[in-house]
Structure formats: C-alpha cells, structure tokens
Image (tube, rainbow, N blue to C red):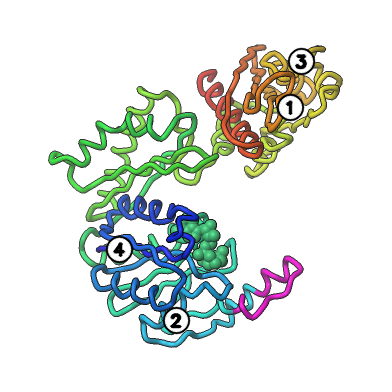
Amino acid sequence: VRVEIVAVGTELLLGQIADTNSAWLGEQLAAAGVDSHFHQAVGDNHARIVLALRTALARSDGVIVCGGLGPTQDDITREAIAEVMNVPLVRDEEIVARIASFFVARGRTMSENNARQADVPEGGSVIEQVQGTAPGLICPVGNKVVYAVPGVPYEMAEMFERGILPDLRRRLARSGEESVIVSRVLRTWGTSESALAEALQARIDVLDGPARPEGTVTIAFLASGIEGIKVRLTARARTDDEVVGLLDAEEQAVRAVLAERLGDIVFGLDDETMEQAVAALLVERGLRLGLAESLTGGLICSRLVEVPGASHWLAGGVVAYESAVKHRVLGVPPGPVVTEVAAGAMAQGARTVLGADVGLGITGVAGPDTQEGVAPGAVFVGLALPGDRLVTREFHLPGDRPRVRQYAAISALDLLRRELIDGG
Ligand code: ATP
Ligand code: MG
C-alpha cells in the first residue's frame, strides 16, 4: 500500500510556514509500514489541488490531504476532492448541528461559511472533529482513497491517529501485505531524541538488517514537546498472538537497552501520563503527597487531580507565590527564595503543614525577567521523603514562560517518580 501526502496552502509555497505536517505524516506512515514515495505541496487553487490529487491517485493507493478544510473562502479542499470523485457535495445536517452547538457554547452564532465545513463529497464519510470545527474526510475513489485532515498540526495529528491509521491498517490487511499491525508506545522523560536514537541504533540496525526476526518490528521516535519523547514499537505479523509476542519481546529488549544506557527514563506505556505513573507509585508505597508550588502556581496539583481517586494519595497543595507566604505559611527560613535550599524547605513545609508523607516543593524563575539574580529557566525542586530524607535538584529548562512552567511541572513529577522507585 502506497500513500502520498498533499499539503495544501499557499503559505507553504511562499515559505511563510514550514511543512511540518508532511514530515510528521511521513514518519508515521513509515512506522506503520506504509510506503510513501511522493510528497506534494500545492497552493489554495482549485484547479491545481485537483491536479495534485489526480497525480497522486495515479501513482499511489491513497492520498492524505492536509489543510484547506476551514471555513474561509480559500479553504477549498472539499470542493477539489468532490471534483476528483466526480460527485456533488452534500451537506450533512448532523454536522451542521454539531458545529452550531460549538458556536452556541461559545456564545457566538454560526455563519454560512462555517456550515460549509459540513459539506461531504457524496459517497465519502467523515472523521468526526473533536477540537476544532472542521471534520476530516475519508473519500473512496474506486478502490483507492483520499483522506482529508485540517492543517492545524495538532488537529491533523489527532485525526490521523484516530481516523486514518485504523483505516489504513484495514487496507493493509485486505491487501494481504500483513494481517495484524499493532503499536505500543514507551513514554520517556529526561533525555533527547538524539540520545534515544543513539542508544537504540544497534537495535534498529538488527531490526532493519537481513537477520531480522520472524515478522517485523519497527521503532520510531515521536517528540511530544512538554510530554517527553515517545518510542513507538510497531509489529506486523500474521496473528494477534504473534504480534503481541513480538511487541513483548521488543519492549523488553528496548527497555533493557534504555535502562542500561540512559537510566530510568521510561515512565509509562501508550496513553499513560506522568501523573498516572506517580499516582501508581504513591498508591503502591501507601504514601500521601503534599505540594508547595511557586512558579508552577498549582499546575502540578492540577495535573495530579486529573487522576481519578487522587484523594487517596494527594493531601493537597499550597501555592506560595509571594516570598512572605513561603516564610509565613511554609516556614521557609529568611533569605533568598529561588534556591535549592528554599525548595527543600518548601518541601518540608508542605509535608508538615499538609500532614503528608511526602512533600514536594518547587521554586524557580519562569521569566522573562531574572529574579534574585537568577536567570529564567532555573528551577529548584525539593522532596521531603519518609525517614526525613531530603532530596533537592536544580534544573535549567528551555523556552518562554509558559513552557518553563510546563517543563518545571513534569520535571518535578519525574524527579518524584524516580525517587519513589529508588526509595522503595
Ligand atoms: P482551519 O480550520 O484552521 O482554517 P484548515 O484545514 O483550513 O484549518 P489551513 O487553513 O490550511 O487549514 O491551515 C491552518 C493553519 O495550520 C495554518 O495557518 C498553519 O499554521 C497550519 N498549517 C497548515 N498546513 C500546514 C503544514 N503542512 N505544516 C505545518 N503547519 C500547517
Ligand atoms: Mg484555513
């Protein structure tokens, strides 16, 4: 099965934005075992989008079009697909209602242009929208297919995973190329994509080499920004059992290499989040956590209460933003408050004030200005652990204020995770 990518948008041709969607999709297709021999970029022009689609369909089994599904007049991808299919666009009233309710929920009214997003080429089906207002499309053309997804990268990625990948897998299965394809994702924190790739290079060489094991497994890296880097294992084989066997063996092999080369960087599998990993360890150890947050302003606490049943292991948190609050409420000794010592004192304060078994304190400089002569991105985390064990750590985190705060939250949770593993 060969799939071609067509990125729609004049801004791509003008170099105003880089075509990161095609790069991402290319990586995903490769990891899924789908060949992709051509990528095209085309402007917001009806005749040229039609030409791009026809060209792609002539030499591939499927096309993924991204962009041009929005509500404005220059968003004409659906019209172009309908022309290629030689069918009319049919307005789906259910989708109109869903888009309208999206607007009502925001206290706005829907314009006629927005209703255009409910137009579906006759014979096509939709990938339901979850975040924005434009649904994706799955449009059969003979025994080939055109998939359309929005241009906004996270909407595109989400729809690819949810709507396109499963459909592609059915096509792969039908083509008899493989019968079962399953992925498993190892989620990591605390290392770079290049370090991961380097650590796993020998393993990847084996998998790609002539002596590769029965069935096939591929390894792909997916940088997920503030949520770390994912290592995705994809296995293909004839039966479910074989695929699970391959994935189990590969997961073990990869975990062993990573543990040896990079330490305890794998915090979860598939959709497991850092806060879930921390929660599971706290439950296992029978410990309650209390927080004292400065620059994260409650972000850590907010992430932790996402986990159902948090009241069993989370006492609560103090948002100690002003220095005086750190001193008065948490008992941080007089003096500077953006230091490792202050973070440690905050952790001990949280443990005492909140009556918890483990206290986590975090302070630092989110930026853009320096504070107490400390540069933005400097973050200090303290952990007050059972047995009066105190651990403190200094981080230097990249990015602007929102990023530093997000990175600070997950870095602190990861430090806690590692200490809980080591300490228990
Ligand atoms: P919208 O409903 O937001 O209008 P759309 O489906 O019409 O979505 P476009 O208008 O083409 O998509 O693109 C929306 C935004 O998504 C662009 O302004 C750009 O920032 C980003 N984008 C579009 N195509 C790409 C691409 N190939 N690579 C990276 N970013 C892209
Ligand atoms: Mg648009």
Q: Position of residue 39 (x, y in %)?
A: 32, 60
Q: Earlier in the sequence, mark 2 or mark 4?
A: 4
Residue name at image x 66 percent, y 36 percent: 401
Please say if the residues under marks 1 and 3 sit with CB atoms less than 8 Å apart.
no
Q: Earlier in the sequence, mark 4 or mark 3?
A: 4
Disc on res. 292: 1
Mark 3 vs ligand 1: CB below 8 Å: no
Residue at the farthest left position: 210
Highlighted range, magenta = 100-115
Front position among marks 4 and 1? 4
Residue name at image x 43 percent, y 84 percent: 122
103 falls in the magenta region:
yes
Inspect the image, locate mark 4, and give the three-letter code of the amino acid beneath it: Val
Inspect the image, locate mark 2, and give the three-letter code of the amino acid beneath it: Pro
In the foreground, 290 or 112? 112
User: Viewed as shown, does residue 416 lie left or right of 291?
Assistant: left
In the foreground, 304 or 161? 161
Disc on res. 336: 3
Residue name at image x 54 percent, y 84 percent: 91
What is the secondary structure assignment of the residue under circle 4?
A: strand
Distance Cα–Cα, label 3 vs label 2: 64 Å
- Residue topped by disc 4: 3
Distance Cα–Cα, label 2 vs label 4: 20 Å
Task: State which quarter of the image contains the N terminus.
Answer: bottom left
**Snapshot quadrant of residue 353:** top right
- Other-residue count near label 1 (Cα within 10 Å), few / some / many at <14 / 14–19 / ≥20: many
Front position among marks 1 and 2? 2
Q: Earlier in the sequence, mark 3 or mark 2?
A: 2
In the foreground, 36 or 420? 36
In the foreground, 143 or 403? 403
What is the secondary structure assignment of the residue under circle 1?
A: strand
